[in-house]
Image: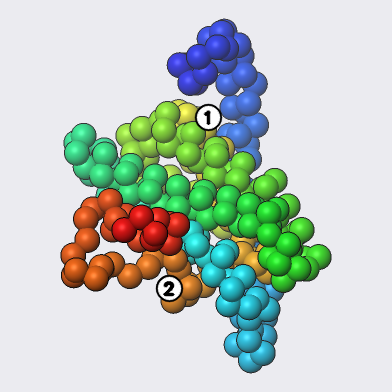
Amino acid sequence: MAGEFRYIPQDTLTDITNLVNPVLDAVVPFVPYLVVMAFLPGLLRAMLQYKIEASKGSFLNDDTDRKLRSVPLSVGIWGLLFVHMILFAVPGMAQVFASGEGARATLEIVVMGFAFFTLFGFLNVLLRFGLDADVRKSLGKLGYLDVAIIATVLLPALGVGLYAWSTVRWASVWTGTVFWQNWVDAFTFNFNHTDFYKDMPVFMKLHIIIVPLASAHLLYSRLLTHLIIPRPSLWRLGAIGTEHGHVGAAEAAALMYGISAEKKGDH
């Protein structure tokens, strides 16, 4: 944890690391069981919700849905999911990305981009819920549960991931056995090959534990289950073009992010 916190003495960081590491090393091998136990009930609930909405329609009107999708939350979540699944399926790919600065930077930019899309999507939901009475009315009492899940579970977990990604060169400590060996060992009740966890940074161990368990909460939230299903027609991307048939870079950015309406009178 050296250098991760500027105003905390290194001796304190070392003591914290020595105290926390044995606990994390003991918990990590059991993460597969915890993930399955967390995901299965949520998945069944989400499938039931999807079936109900398919037959009866969305519980949100288009105006509320459009406000909550102003930032495409589904793009960030699905992007993070697919990047992680690719790295899990081909563990050596992470090592390839770690082999050169350009490749490593590309991977970091892509992951951070999806992470910030997810972060801004969560913040947009919280702000709309807090500032818009119509949104609160549409979400009803369950909306408070949705907000609680975002504020107390998902945002802190995302914060751990963002902080870890910005301070640890994950690709350089990733091995081809980290993911698959963990799951194979867990479900064959073989816990004799966990030494490779001990050399990992604390925040990577936290990521392995926290992120999959926090992600399961997406399926327990009626609103988030709804929002992770992409509906591009409701995203506020806007059309690119002007009366004269061309548009500058600044105006294009304004149109893309839905802020051009306020400046319409200036043209």
The answer to whether the residue labelled 2 contacts the one labelled 1, judged by CB atoms less than 8 Å apart, is no
Q: Residue 46 location, x and y as percent? A: 64, 73
- Foreground: disc 2 or disc 1: 2
Q: Amino acid at mark 1?
A: Val
For disc 1, the neighbor class at 10 Å (few under 14, some 14 to 19, many from 20) is: many
Q: Closest to the observer: 109 or 193?
A: 109
Q: Quadrant of the C terminus?
A: bottom left
Give residue 261's quadrant in the image.
bottom left
Residue tagged 1: 202
Say whether residue 139 is visible.
no
Q: Amino acid at mark 2?
A: Pro
Q: Secondary structure at mark 1?
A: helix
Say whether residue 168 is visible.
yes
Q: Secondary structure at mark 2?
A: helix
Report the Cα–Cα distance between label 2 and label 1.
38 Å
* Residue 10 position (above or below residue 265): above
Q: Residue 143 location, x and y as percent? A: 74, 63
Q: What label does residue 232 carry, if any?
A: 2
Residue at 39 percent across and 59 percent down: it is 265
Q: Residue 187 location, x and y as percent? A: 57, 57
Q: Closest to the observer: 30 or 216?
A: 216
Q: Closest to the observer: 188 or 258?
A: 258
Q: Residue furthest right?
A: 141
Residue at 41 percent across and 52 percent down: it is 114
Q: What label does residue 258 carry, if any?
A: none
Mark closest to the chain's N terminus, 2 or 1? 1
> Taking 234 as reference, is 55 left or right?
right
Residue at 26 percent across and 39 percent down: it is 105
* Residue 88 position (above or below residue 107): below
